[in-house]
Image (cartoon, coloured by chain):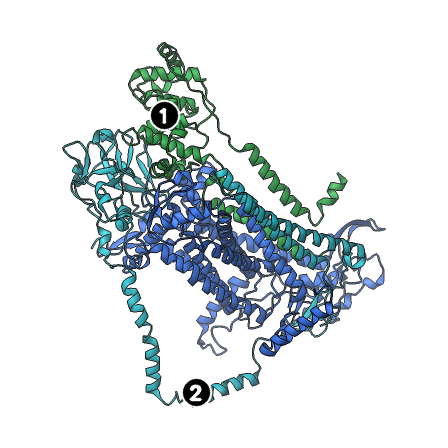
Amino acid sequence: MSTQQNPGHGDEVVAHEGSAPVTHFQNPGLPPHKPRQGDLHPSAAKRAERQVVILFTISIIGTIGAVVAWALVPPGDTPSSMRLSNFLIGFGLFLSLMGIGTAAVHWAKALMNDHEKVEMRHPQRSSDENRAAAVEVLKEGAADSGIGRRGVLKGAAVTSLALFPLAIAVPLIGDIGGNWDVSQLKHTIWRKGVKLTTDPAGRPIKAADVTIGSVFHVIPENLEEVPAEDRLNQKAKAVVLLVRLDPKDLKESEERKGWSYDGIVAYSKICTHVGCPVALYEQQTHHLLCPCHQSTFDVADGAKVVFGPAKRALPQLPIEVDDEGYLVAQSDFLEPVGPSFWERLK
Amino acid sequence: MSTTSPTRGARAASGTADYLDQRTGVGTAVKEFARKIFPDHWSFLLGEIALYSFVVLLISGVFLTMFFVPSMGETHYHGPWAAMDGVEMSQAFASTLRLSFEVRGGLLMRQIHHWAALLFMASIVTHMMRVFFTGAFRKPREVNWVVGFVLMILGLAAGFSGYSLPDDVLSGNGLRITDGVVKAIPIIGSYMSFFLFGGEFPGTDIIPRLFTVHILLVPGLILALIGLHLFFVVLHKHTQYPGPGRTDKNVVGYPLFPVYTAKAGGFFFIVFGVIALMAATMTINPVWNYGPYDPSPVSAGAQPDWYMLFLEGALRLMPGQTEYVIGGYTLSLNVLIPAMVVPGILFVAIAAYPFIEAAVTKDKREHHVLDRPRNAPFRTAFGVAFLTAFVVLVLAGSNDLIATQFKMSLNDITWAFRVLLFVGPAFAFWVTKRICLSLQRKDRELVLHGHETGRIVRFAHGEYIEVHRPLDEYEQWLLVSYDSPRPLEIEPAEDSRGVRRKGYRLDRFKQRVSRIFFEDRVEPVTPAELAAAHSHGEHDALTGPESANAQVTSEVGSRPAAETEIDGRNH
Amino acid sequence: MKALAARRHHRHAPVVLLLLALLATGALYAVLAPTSADAADSAASANDIEAGDKLFQANCATCHGPTGEGSGSAPSLIGVGAASVDFQVGTGRMPMAISGPQAEAKPAQFNAEQTAQLAAYVASLGAGPGIPVAEQVDPSKGDAANGMALFRTNCAMCHNAVGAGGALSEGKYAPSLLETTNTHIYEAMATGPQSMPVFSDANLTSEEKRDIIAYIDAQREPSPGGINLGSLGPVSEGLWVWVVGMGLLIGAAVWIGAKSS
C-alpha cells in the first residue's frame, strides 16, 4: 500500500485464455508523482491556506446575510418585494453553502496529501471452502426443520403466508375506488331543458348573442345545484364549447340535422384522446386544437379528427332554443364523453 | 477549551472513542473504511450530484410539509397575491400560495425543492450515461445497475407525485392525462381510474393520496435503495479508468479520510449552493400563474417536467387511426402504444442491457477497469441511438414551443419527428460506430508512429521526413490496454461424417448476434506490430544503430520504442 | 494579444469562458428584454371619414375592394367597426406583407391620425365595435382575480397562462400579449382578428374585458421567483436545469477531479 511503487509491474499483465504474452504490452505501473506548487514552495501552500480561510469567511458572511435578510426584508405585498426577499435570502444561502463547498475542495486539492494510494481488490466470489461450508450449514438447518420430510407442513406454511395479505388487500381495494360505479363515466348532468351558461360566470346565453365567429365556454346551469364535493367531477364531464358558424359552412349528417340552432353547435370540450380540454378554436378554419397533444377537430364537419392522436370526433350536445330565446340542451350527450375506455360502447 | 489544553481535548476524544468502541466495536469499521481508496475522476461525481440533490430534496421537503395542507377541501384565498384574491380553490393550492408569499423563505424553499427535483433526475440520467458508456455495469455490478435503474423509476414516481400536489391547472391537466391513459388499459381501465382517484376524476382523494406517496412511500424506498446502491459501491470498490498502474485487481486513488471526505463533503455544499442560486434567481413552477385546478381551462405550453416529456412526446406523435372497436369493446392503441408500450420498451432495454451484453460476449470475468467508449463501438453506438430516440421524443413533447420559437408549422414538426423517431436512432448508431472505429484507428496510428513534432528533417540524399516523437510508456499503455472481442466462431453445421449436429441453429443465432456486436473491430497494437513499425522506419534513422531493433518481434514483452527518436515517416 | 493567446490554453479557460458566456447572455437579455410601450389614443371626427376614404382607396382597396365589400383573398370590412381598424392597422398587421391566415404584427405603416381616419371611414361603412375609451381599458379599475378566472377559461389555451403566446395549427400562432397595448387587447377581444374568435359583450362584458386587461397588466410585473424564463412552463425550466444546473455542477466536478497545479 505504499505510494510510489509500481503495482502494475510484472504479475499484473492482463492474461486471457490462450493468449501468448507477445500479443500484449505490460502495464508500466503508476507514473511518478508530480509535486504541486504547494509541495515545492511553502509560500504557495501558505497562499492556498489563506484562500481556504477566505472562502470559509465568505460562507460565514453569507449565513449572516441570509438571516439578516430574513429579519429585515419580508416578502411584502407586491411581486417586487417578494422577489427581493426571495433573492436576498437565497443569495445569502448560496454564499453560505458555496463558501464551505469551495473551501473544503480547495483544501483537499491544494493542501492535503496528493500521493495516489493503491488498494488491492479481491474477487467477489466466496472461496470454495466457504461455499461448501455454507451449503453444509443450510443442509443442517433444513434437516433440523425437517422440511423435506413434512410435506403437508410445508404446504400449510406456504399457503398461509401466501393468503394473509388478502386480509389487508381486500378491505383496501374494496373501498379505495369509492363506489366503484364506473357507469357514471357514461353520463353527465346535461338534461332536456338545462340552460347553457357561460363558464365561470354562469350567465345563460341567448342564441341572438352568439355572433358568427364567437366561441363560448359553457357549463350547464344545474352545475350550481351539484353538491360541492361532486361539482368538479361533474364539471369535468359536462364542459362544452359553443360556436356559431355561418350555416352554409356547416356540414351536418342527416341524423344530427336537428342538433344545432341556426349555425350554433355545441361540442364536448373534453378530448377523446386522453381528456384534456380542447379549446383552441381557430375562427377562420373552424378547427379546434387540443393544446396537450394537438389533436385537431373540424367543428364545421361534426368535430371529426383532422390531425393528431385522437381517433373519435368530439361528442355533440343537441341544443335548441327555449321560449325566452335562451339556448338549452335537448338531452344528455348521446355517447360517453372524454377518453376511450374498454366498455364505453356497452 | 481544547485550544488551550490540547491534551485534555485529546483525552476527551479518546474517552468517547473508547466508550463507543466498547459498545459497538466501531474501531474495526474505522480501520476498515477510513482510508478506503476512491479513484478520482470528474465523471465519478455525477452520481454524487444525484445523491446530494436527494438530500436537498429531503431538507427542503421537510420545510414544505410544515406549511402545506394536502387537502382538496374548498376554501377562498385571501392574501397578498391580488390576482387570486377571493378565488375559490382547494386548501392544497391556497396553502401553496401562503407558503410561497407569506412564509419568509418559503418561496425559496419551494423553488429549491423543485429545482433540486429536476436536477435529481438530470443527474441520475447523466450518471447512468456515464456508467453505460464506460461499461461500469459489467460483472460484478449488474445487480447494482438494476438497483440504480429502480432508483430512476422511483425518481420519476417521486417527481410525478410531487408535481401534482399544488393542485394547479397545469399539474391537474397532467393528472387528467394520466386518467385518460389509465382508462385506455383494456378491461380494467375504468376500474383502475376509480382505484387511483377514489371514484370519478378528479374526486377529492387524489391530492392526499399523492401526498402520502410523495412524502412517505417513494422517499422511503429511495432511501433504502440508495443505501443498497452505496453498499454495493463499497463492496465492489469503485471502478477506475484505464491507465498506467491501474488493473482489474487494484484500485488507485485517494483515501476516504481526509481527501474524499473533504472533496465529496465539499461537493455536497457546492450542489446545494448551485441549487440555492437557481432558486434565488430563477422562477420555477409559478403555480400562481396557472391558478387552482378546474377541469375547464388549460393553457398553451401544457407540458410535464422534463423527465416526463418523452411520454408526452410519444403521445403527441402517435397517429390516432389506431383505436379499434372489437366486438363492441374499445381498444385504444393510440394511447396504449405511446403511453405503455414505448416506455416499456425503453425501460426494459435499459434494465436488461447488462445481461444482454454479458450473454452475447460470454464474458465471465470481473471488470473493474472501465472501457473507453470508443473501445466498445457497438455499445457506444447503441447508447447514442437510444439517447437519440429519447431526445426526439422529448423534442416532440415540446413541439408547440418549437413551433412558436422557431416559427414553424406544428403539423410539419410533428410529421418530421414521426419520421425522425425511426430514422434518427439508426443514423446516430451508424455515425457513432464509425466515429468510434475511427478514433480507435487514430489511437493505433498514434501508438505506431508517435506524435508529430512539426520538425522537418532533410536527408543528405534529399528526402524530407517529419520527425515523430514516440509515446512514453504511460501514454502508450492507455491506448493499447483494451480488449477487442472477436465475433463468436461456431462449429460447422455438419460434422466430419456429414451428420447435421444438434444445436446448430441456436449457435448460428448466437453467432449472428455476436457479429452485430463485434463484426467491425479495430484491434489494439501489439508489441510485435509496434516493433515492425519501428523497423520499417529504420532506414531513415538519424540517431544511429540503436534504433535498428528489427528483431524485436521475438523479444517478449520488451518496450522497443522507448529509445527510438524517429520511428516512422509521415505517411 | 500574446498574453491572451497564452491564457487561452490555461486550465481555467473553459470555466472563465462559460462564466463570460453566461454574463453576456444575461446582459444581452437585459438589453433586448421587452419594454412596454403606450400608443396614443385619438378620437375620430366627421371629416376624418373623407381623408380615411382616400387612404383606403390607396392602400386597402386592392384586396378589400373599393367599398370594403371584400374579395376572395380578404374579408368584407362592412360592420367590422372602428375597433377592428384601430387594432389591425395600429399593430401594423394591416396592410399585410403577404396574404395568409397569420397577419404578423410589425411597425405600423400609418400614424395615429391616419389610423383614426381609416377607422372613421370603415366605421362609416356599417355599425361595429368602436374603439374603447380610456376608462374601459384602465387596469386599475379592473378586478385582476376575476380577470384571472376569465382569462384562463377563454384565453390561456392559446395565449398561455400569462399571455406569453402559443402555437396554433399549420404554422399559425397566438401572439404574446405582454407587449400589446391595453386598447389593442380590448379591440382584439371585441373583433376577433384572424384566427381569434370574437368575444362580444354578451360573452365577455365590457367590465369583464377590463378585468382581463387588469390580469394581463399584472403579469407584466416581475415574477416573485426571479427571472421568468420566458413564462413558457416546464420545458424551459427543464432546458435551464440542464444548461445552468448541470452545466455549473459538471464544471465544478471537473475542477474537483482535476489535479492541483
Q: Crowding at label 2, few (<14), some or many (≥20) Cα neighbours within 10 Å? A: few
**Residue B29 appears in the picture as rendered:** yes
Q: Is residue B535 above or below residue A293?
A: below
From the image, state the color of chain A. cyan
C50 and A224: which is toward the camera: A224
**Residue B318 appears in the picture as rendered:** no
Q: Chain of mark 2?
A: A
Task: Name which residue type carries label 2.
Answer: Ala
Q: Would residue B548 appear left or right of B335 to someone viewing this image?
A: right
Residue A254 position, x and y percent, is 17, 39
Which residue matches tag 1? Answer: C136
Q: Which one of the lettered chains is coloured green?
A: C
Q: Which mark is residue A142?
A: 2
Q: Crowding at label 1, few (<14), some or many (≥20) Cα neighbours within 10 Å? A: many
Q: Chain of mark 1?
A: C
* Mark in front: 2 vs 1: 1
